[in-house]
Amino acid sequence: MSASHRSVARRLGLGDDVEVHVHLQHLDLVDHACMDLLGDWERQRERAGGTLFLEWAALERRYQRAG
């Protein structure tokens, strides 16, 4: 787990084995770094036995609009 992923999990008080739902309605900006972080975090959580639920299609649309 990278330092940025540990920071997100620690700030949210999450263990690696819990189910996480990410809601996008208050998200203002999506850039390449955000997409990478969330994708990496999802893969890491899955390896640890957890789940990250994220509306990838909606996130991708916001990312494309920002570009």
Image: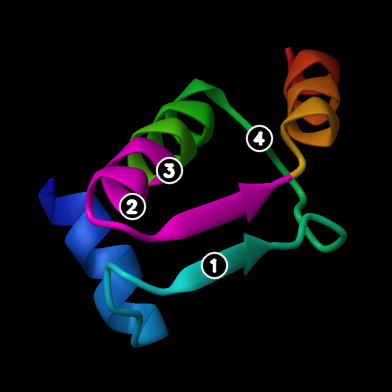
Question: Distance of mark 4 from mark 2, alpha carbons?
Answer: 21 Å
Q: Could you tell me if the residues under marks 1 and 4 are in contact, i.e. CB atoms within 8 Å?
A: no
Amino acid marked by disc 2: Arg
**Quadrant assignment, res 17:** bottom left
* Residue 9 image offset from top left, x and y in percent: 31, 71
Amino acid marked by disc 3: Glu
- Which of the labelled discs sits on residue 30, or is there none? 4
Q: Is residue 12 magenta?
A: no
- Which residues fall within the magenta stretch? 42-54
Amino acid marked by disc 4: Val
Q: Answer with mark 1 or mark 4, whichever residue precedes in sequence.
A: 1
The answer to whether residue 4 is left or right of residue 30 is left
Q: Residues within 10 Å of mark 4 (few under 14, many from 20)?
A: some
Q: Circle 3 sits in a helix, a strand or a loop, which is it?
A: helix
- Which of the labelled discs sits on residue 20, or is there none? 1
Question: Distance of mark 1 from mark 4, alpha carbons?
Answer: 19 Å
Where does label 2 land, which residue?
45
Q: Residue at x 33, y 81 (%)?
A: 11
The answer to whether residue 15 is left or right of residue 30 is left
Q: Could you tell me if the residues under marks 1 and 3 are in contact, i.e. CB atoms within 8 Å?
A: no
Q: Residues within 10 Å of mark 1 (few under 14, many from 20)?
A: some
Question: Distance of mark 1 from mark 3, alpha carbons?
Answer: 9 Å
Q: Residue at x 85, y 19 (%)?
A: 65
Question: Distance of mark 3 from mark 2, alpha carbons?
Answer: 5 Å
Where does label 3 land, which residue?
42
- Residue 56, above or below 17: above
